[in-house]
Amino acid sequence: MSQVHTRPCFPIAGGQYLAVSAAKGPRGKAARLVLPLGHLMQSGDLCLSFRHRVTGLHSGALQVFVRKQGAHGAALWGRNGGHGWRQTQISLRGAGIKSVIFKGEKRRGHTGEIGLDDVSLKRGHCYEERVQLRN
């Protein structure tokens, strides 16, 4: 876990965010953030929301997994590059979710970082707010 750091987050809200640097550690090294869910959050659909960025050429990948029973299954979502901070929402369907796992894995690049911020989990489905412009 020594590869996970917090960094100032000036352009967003002035706070901190979790970061995995591509410049440190061996290729294939991974950091995980596990969000265990209490029994109250295991009873239906959930909306997972978070901000993320993956910078640098071949720097790494950020993935999201869900664990229901035993080990987690295949990644539900993943990003291995991008253009600055992005907001993502994922609807997690079904009862019995024990935990949500974020995995940041360093790849062969030597610059850049994987950043994670503003993680929230709410009951119900995710939805997009739509703004209608009137003439």
Image (cartoon, rainbow, N blue to C red):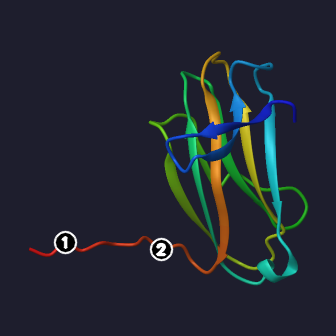
Up/down of 119 relative to 4, above or below: below
> Crowding at label 1, few (<14), some or many (≥20) Cα neighbours within 10 Å?
few
Residue 85, placed above or below residue 54: below
For the C terminus, give its image quadrant. Answer: bottom left
In the rendered image, residue 109, in percent from the top left (x then y), is placed at 63, 18
Where residue 88 sits: x, y (%)?
53, 56
The residue positioned 72% from the left and 33% from the top of the image is: 20
Q: What mark, if any, has residue 14 been given in the picture?
A: none
Looking at this rendering, what residue extends furthest in the top direction?
Answer: 110
**Marks 2/1: CA–CA distance:** 19 Å
| Residue lying at 87% horizontally and 31% vertically, measured from the top left | 2
Q: Position of residue 38 (x, y in %)?
A: 86, 75
User: Where is 124 relative to 114, above or below?
Assistant: below
Mark number displayed over residue 133: 1
Residue 127's disc is: 2
The secondary element bearing badge 2 is classed as loop
Q: In the image as oriented, which residue stretches furthest toward the left?
A: 135
Along the polypeptide, which appears first: circle 2 or circle 1?
Answer: 2
